[in-house]
Image (cartoon, rainbow, N blue to C red):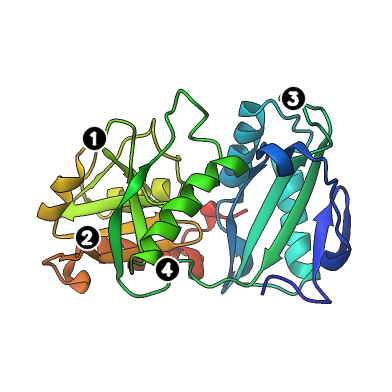
Amino acid sequence: MYYNADSKVYLDGAFIPAREAQTDLYSQTLHYGSGVFEGIRSYDTPDGVRIFKAKEHYERLKYSAESMHMPFPWTVEELTKISYDLLEINQLKDAYIRPLIYLGANMSLTPTNEVHLVMMAWEWGKYLGDKLLNIMLSSYQRPNPKSCHVQAKVVGHYTNSILATTEAKQKGFDEALLTDINGYVAEGPGANFFYEKDGKLVTAPLGNILSGITRATVFEIAKELEIEVEERFFKPEEIYSADIAFFCGTAAEVIGIGKYNEHVFPMKWEDSNSQLIQRKYKRRVAFNEYKEFYI
């Protein structure tokens, strides 16, 4: 699904066949989850293949690595060039790019200076599909922000996401919605959450959630469309009074939510401001509408 006999990955300075890539079985990342990564998309635009907000993604990768006491010897410009070279070598246009920084052999719970960079790319459709989602309130919560760096994309953090998504799918839902440690709505397992009421968007503030790059893009688009966005804490039961809702993230892009705990939102998706944001986001990434957002 992700690679074949012809696929190449970038590993520690060289492009090699994906099937030949190896790692140390004593890697601290493998045993303890101390690694960091990014999810980035490229699009085949009228101006050629473009990576959306590569700078922001690689700046966040640097922040994540530094948060985990991992050396980061690469520049944003270097990582961006590797990304474009990887796409060209694999003849990919509309693709998903996954840079991962992982650690060398270390069975102790202390930092190590041995870091490795692997970068992969593959064709991947929208992570949550195209249809309106049916989501449930998860029994799991996002980690306590005093227990880890919640705004860093750390490998080990995603065990929480796997548990929440698995629970939702086992119960017949498309995806989960998690709360923070205080019981306020936080985000989805791999996407930020917004709901719309009377034309205004409401979303959780930073602090207990990942600072999503697509989330920031939604704020930019909403400002251009003169749609009000409010960041505040709110309880899950408040969602029942919403008109409509959506998830957003690099993998998911902007995807509408039609049901919450089997409660059907009253507004048609095509009549919502949320759908306007989705359409404008699609134009922005697919048609290179705003070239300054690409590198």
Residue occupied by mark 3 = 111
Helix, strand or loop for disc 3:
loop
Question: Closer to us: mark 1 or mark 3?
Answer: 3
Crowd around label 1: few <14 · some 14–19 · many ≥20 (10 Å): some
- State whether residue 57 is above or below residue 262: above
Real-space CA distance between mark 1 and mark 2, rounded to the nearest whole angstrom? 20 Å
Crowd around label 2: few <14 · some 14–19 · many ≥20 (10 Å): some
**Residue 240 relative to residue 160: left or right:** left
Question: Closer to us: mark 4 or mark 3?
Answer: 3
Place of residue 12 in the rendered image (x, y in percent of width and height, measured from the top left):
86, 47
Residue occupied by mark 1 = 233
Q: Quadrant of residue 84?
A: bottom right
Q: Nearer the viewer, residue 234 or 26?
A: 26
Real-space CA distance between mark 2 and mark 3, rounded to the nearest whole angstrom? 42 Å
Residue occupied by mark 2 = 261
Residue occupied by mark 4 = 283
Helix, strand or loop for disc 2:
loop
Q: Nearer the viewer, residue 56 or 14?
A: 14
Real-space CA distance between mark 4 and mark 3, rounded to the nearest whole angstrom? 43 Å
Q: Residue at x 47, y 58 (%)?
A: 290
The kind of residue on which mark 2 rests is Asn
The kind of residue on which mark 4 rests is Arg
